[in-house]
Image (cartoon, coloured by chain):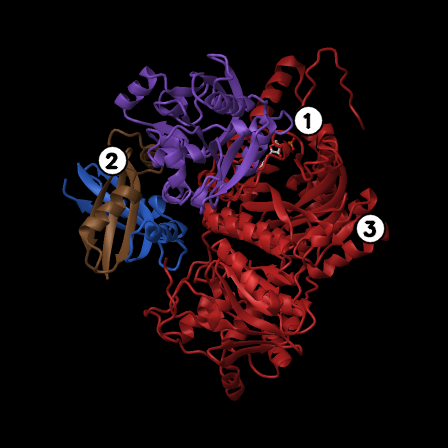
Chain colours: A red, B blue, C purple, D brown
């Protein structure tokens, strides 16, 4: 096995050095921080940040991790969620994934997340690691992942780029999901030219556990150990932070400095499969106090979130992190997005047992620190302090923006342009031709080219999957209790009227779950929009969030979590606003499911409900 | 006609789970002393003499590999 | 009657195999890849999945697992052994069955319900079927195309060792539509489709797959009698 | 330490759908004159000097390739 450990110690900047050199210029703009954000970091710390701290703030305060442009809109969820709606919610917004009580002592957790940009750059690995990430979110709740759904948007079906991106994305989801042994039970495939340079890849995972086994990401208990386990940490997925290293590592452009490090990671589904089984055994043996997956922002995120949610501080010896590349700097180790890693907080007396379970599964596990008294996150590198920050300032107290909101000028014209002006088919021949053309159109034709690549049988609990309206899986084999899930969104409706369009997405997912025979219970969402700095986009966004929140209140089911992806645009053209809505439902016995399709018996009556 | 070989390898900083799996299995099979293994793709192309090196590079870079995660080498071989 | 189901790292359909064995009325015994002991089972199933991620070649790494030594040993002595999907690939890699399984001709993983014809009803795993019976079971694999040279294929056909054949539509480009084969004794069988996922119409297309496990039970009982 | 390369290719008589897919796609992308493509695997091993050619052959034949469907070539390269 490749076990490269750093042989040369790169130059490392300590807190003491940062204190002594307050005027040293730092490449914060290159790292995506604004002037006032950098000034705020300096005021939080009372000095300039070290390289490692700067790397942490830049990733933690990025749009992706901090939700800085969208957070102010969350009040709509709160304002529209009644006590009654909250009653079945065991964990909600703010946790890794929402958790709902489905009865008989079972809790189900589910979440959807985007991996749009990486899937354009490297479709197979981008989509694959998207699946890997959402699955780790579910494990971090203490649940066994049970099923996947994937909601996909591509450019025009005949475009050259689509011919590259679609097969790669489908193969990536198939390759990773199938190898993990998770049945794929639903999703969407939609084509529209606005997605040409910006496909959307949203993956959803559903998991289950006994309600009492819920594990939340907290680092509590002074003296408890912090364990990093799973894959080694490498240089992949460091992206922007390579700016830091290339400036300070070799000091020259042409050397072995970190020029152009890929921001794409490669997934290892086999390692993740083993990691899942290992985590489940650790939970069963009650060896975990708190746990966090490593996703975007890697160790920066895991350590600061664990510490910030707990009741103490945390000390980490970063040089203990097992590395895959030579000469990595602390900033790089903290920002690496290497896949298939988890971070756990463990009582000292459980440490040996914890490590034994990891060894049984051949999972690398390393003690990298401990929970401390006080309120600091302190990170050292070969004995010298390179990070000393209040963890909440990274994880919870990032910037918050009230971005300008402006209804686009063209919206009225868009709405005035009704389909009434389109020619209608007249007579049987034209009607027939229209039906055939519709049936053959990319947005309506069979999805089996994609869905046949997904294993829907594995684990033997799948009761409904494609081509049914909803996916459905058994949770309790003894009683037949199960859950149903569906994702939906029609971006064209949302563009036309973001408020109502989002409610239509909710209503469709809700109906899909209900037509399978399940009772809808809770909602997750993945809000894919254009640039947050475009007031028209922010108007769509605000309308969509409010529409979804008020629609949920109407239906009496809560939003338990979600994910936001801004900046989905090519040049000035944003994608269709695409708030994908996922609805989860419950059924006490899946034997009573209702399969899709007209029944097999002649003489059955066909009824149309609603108007 | 010429025979052209294109080798495509994961970039050094990119994870190579296949190579690691092979490297991890060798000691269990009783083979020691293999420090590292990386696995990539090997293409053999038969091309008309009209196809020049520049075109071959384009094929290798734009189609046989993804430069974001992979490096490639093109060489003509004698048959 | 004890039938073992082996779990390698990355095995996925072991839970389903265990369920199928139990549905057939036998006792399922979980076997671990690192164990060098078969725990007194009367037959063994190598289930599907992605052992070692299918890295290198499907089955290439699992074939060297410690548990394979007693499996190979017992198989040579006549214990019924079944390889499903990844298990079939492992049996081929281990040389217990001829041929090899390669990438599907369309280069994509295929998951679908598939009709199969039972071509041989004399193996340890197929006596419950009528000759020529057609069964509907899921197929789900990316490297499922059966390959062997023409001479080997002729031998297999001549000796009646093609056990299952795809009917209507070959999902992966297998030579001569072969879905499953047996060794010379008819006690070792491998197939790409998944009979263990066709044991209950609630979660599979049919219960056509149960016959495989029932056949093995008959066979072991007869052997004992 | 020595660098060893092992190339594993599908036997000529074995269908190579991956190579065919590449060959079929090239003209559509505007690349003409490529008559045939075959795709195999390329391994790069870093081995201790104690590992002899015989061992390398065993690794390539018994593990890295499947002799039923594949041929292999082992060569040591200068680094
Ligand atoms: N990307 C996907 N992944 C998994 N299943 C999908 C995907 N796209 C579509 N499906 C499934 O295929 C079936 C048909 O999809 P679709 O045509 O969108 O249905 P509908 O129009 O009835 O919502 C549904 O069961 C859906 O869940």
Q: Does dot 3 land on a helix, a strand or a loop?
A: loop
In which of the image's four quarters is ligand 1 placed? top right
Res A595 label: 1
Using residue A93 as the reference point, say whether residue A349 is left or right of it: left
Quarter of image, res A217: bottom right
Alpha carbon separation for disc pair 2 and 1: 52 Å
Q: Is residue A76 visible?
A: yes
Q: Nearer the viewer, residue C29 or C106?
A: C29
Give the residue number, with chain letter if any, for mark 3: A87
In the picture, the quarter occupied by the N terminus of chain A is bottom left
Using residue A20 as the reference point, say whether residue A261 is left or right of it: left
Picture coordinates of residue A510, whole percent (x, y): 74, 38
Q: Does dot 2 land on a helix, a strand or a loop?
A: loop
Quarter of image, res C160: top left
Q: Residue at x 71, y 42 (%)?
A: A584
Alpha carbon separation for disc pair 3 and 2: 68 Å
Give the residue number, with chain letter if any, for mark 2: D33
Picture coordinates of residue A344, whole percent (x, y): 59, 63
What chain does mark 2 sit on?
A: D
Q: Are marks 3 and 2 in contact (CB under 8 Å)?
A: no
């Amino acid at each position: 096995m490749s076990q490269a450990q750093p042989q040369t110690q790169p130059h490392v900047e300590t807190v003491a050095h940062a204190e002594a050199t307050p005027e040293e210029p730092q490449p914060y703009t290159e790292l995506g921080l604004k002037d006032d954000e950098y000034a705020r970091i300096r005021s939080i710390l009372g000095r300039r940040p070290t390289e490692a701290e700067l790397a942490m703030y830049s990733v933690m305060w990025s749009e992706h991790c901090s939700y800085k442009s969208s957070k102010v809109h969350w009040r709509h969820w709160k304002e529209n969620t009644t006590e009654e709606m909250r009653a079945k919610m065991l964990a909600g917004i703010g946790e890794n994934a929402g958790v709902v009580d489905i009865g008989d002592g079972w809790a189900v957790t589910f979440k959807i997340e985007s991996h749009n940009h990486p899937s354009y750059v490297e479709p197979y690995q981008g989509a694959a690691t998207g699946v890997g990430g959402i699955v780790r979110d579910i494990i971090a709740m203490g649940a066994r992942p049970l099923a996947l759904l994937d909601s996909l948007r591509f450019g025009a079906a005949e475009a050259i780029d689509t011919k590259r991106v679609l097969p790669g994305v489908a193969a990536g989801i198939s390759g990773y999901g199938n190898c993990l042994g998770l049945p794929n039970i639903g999703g969407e495939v939609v084509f529209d030219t606005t997605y040409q340079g910006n496909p959307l890849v949203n993956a959803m995972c559903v998991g289950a556990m006994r309600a009492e086994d819920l594990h939340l990401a907290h680092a509590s208990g002074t003296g408890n150990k912090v364990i990093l386990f799973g894959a080694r940490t490498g240089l992949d997925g460091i992206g922007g932070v390579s700016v830091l290293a290339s400036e300070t590592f070799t000091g020259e452009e042409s050397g072995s400095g970190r020029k152009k490090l890929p921001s794409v990671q490669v997934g290892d589904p086999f390692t993740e499969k083993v990691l899942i089984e290992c985590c489940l055994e650790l939970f069963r043996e009650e060896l975990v106090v708190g746990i966090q997956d490593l996703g975007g922002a890697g160790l920066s995120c895991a350590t600061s979130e664990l510490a910030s949610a707990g009741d103490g501080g945390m000390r980490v010896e970063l040089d203990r992190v097992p590395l895959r590349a030579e000469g990595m700097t602390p900033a790089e180790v903290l920002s690496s997005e290497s896949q298939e890693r988890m971070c756990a907080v463990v009582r000292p007396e459980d440490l040996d047992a914890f490590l034994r379970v990891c060894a049984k599964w051949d999972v690398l596990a390393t003690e990298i620190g401990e929970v401390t008294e006080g309120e600091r996150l302190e990170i050292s590198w070969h004995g010298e302090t390179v990070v000393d920050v209040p963890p909440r300032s990274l994880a919870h107290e990032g910037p918050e923006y009230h971005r300008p909101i402006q209804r686009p000028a063209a919206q009225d014209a868009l709405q005035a342009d009704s389909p009434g002006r389109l020619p209608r088919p007249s007579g049987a021949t034209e009607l027939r031709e229209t039906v055939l053309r519709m049936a053959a159109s990319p947005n309506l034709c069979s999805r089996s080219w994609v869905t046949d690549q997904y294993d829907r049988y594995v684990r033997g609990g799948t009761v409904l999957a494609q081509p049914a309206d909803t996916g459905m899986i058994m949770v309790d084999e003894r009683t037949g209790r199960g859950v149903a899930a569906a994702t939906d969104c029609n971006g064209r409706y949302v563009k036309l009227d973001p408020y109502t369009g989002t409610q239509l997405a909710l209503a469709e997912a809700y109906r899909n779950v209900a037509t399978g025979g399940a009772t809808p219970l809770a909602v997750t969402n993945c809000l894919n929009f254009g640039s947050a700095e475009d007031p028209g986009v922010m108007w769509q966004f605000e309308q969509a969030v409010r529409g979804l929140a008020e629609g949920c209140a109407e239906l009496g089911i809560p939003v338990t979590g979600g994910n936001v992806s801004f900046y989905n645009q090519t040049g000035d053209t944003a994608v269709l606003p695409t708030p994908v809505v996922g609805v989860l439902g419950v059924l006490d016995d899946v034997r009573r499911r209702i399969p899709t399709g007209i029944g097999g018996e002649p003489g059955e009556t066909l009824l149309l409900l609603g108007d | 006609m010429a025979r052209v070989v294109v080798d495509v390898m994961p970039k050094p900083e990119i994870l190579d789970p296949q190579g690691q799996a092979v490297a991890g299995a060798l000691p269990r099979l009783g083979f020691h002393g293999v420090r590292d293994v990386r696995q990539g793709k090997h293409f053999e192309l038969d091309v008309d003499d009209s196809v020049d090196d520049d075109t071959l590079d384009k094929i290798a870079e734009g189609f046989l590999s993804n430069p974001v995660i992979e490096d490639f080498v093109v060489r003509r071989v004698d048959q | 009657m004890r039938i073992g189901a082996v779990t390698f790292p990355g095995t996925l359909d072991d839970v389903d195999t265990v369920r199928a064995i139990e549905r057939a009325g036998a006792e399922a015994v979980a076997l671990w890849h690192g164990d060098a002991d078969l725990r007194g089972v009367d037959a063994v199933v190598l289930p599907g999945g992605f052992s070692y991620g299918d890295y290198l070649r499907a089955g290439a790494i699992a074939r060297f697992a410690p548990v394979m030594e007693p499996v190979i040993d017992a198989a040579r002595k006549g214990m019924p052994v079944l390889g499903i999907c990844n298990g079939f690939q492992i049996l081929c890699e281990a040389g217990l069955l001829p041929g090899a399984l390669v990438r599907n001709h369309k280069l994509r993983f295929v998951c679908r319900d598939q009709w199969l014809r039972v071509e041989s009803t004399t193996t340890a795993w197929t006596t419950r079927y009528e000759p020529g019976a057609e069964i509907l079971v899921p197929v789900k694999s990316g490297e499922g195309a059966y390959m062997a040279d023409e001479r080997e294929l002729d031998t297999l056909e001549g000796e009646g060792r093609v056990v299952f054949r795809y009917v209507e539509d070959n999902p992966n480009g297998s030579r001569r539509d072969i879905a499953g084969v047996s060794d010379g004794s008819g006690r070792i069988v491998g197939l790409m489709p998944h009979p263990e996922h066709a044991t209950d119409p609630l979660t599979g297309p049919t219960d056509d797959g149960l016959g495989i496990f029932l056949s093995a039970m008959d066979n072991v009982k007869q052997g004992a009698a």
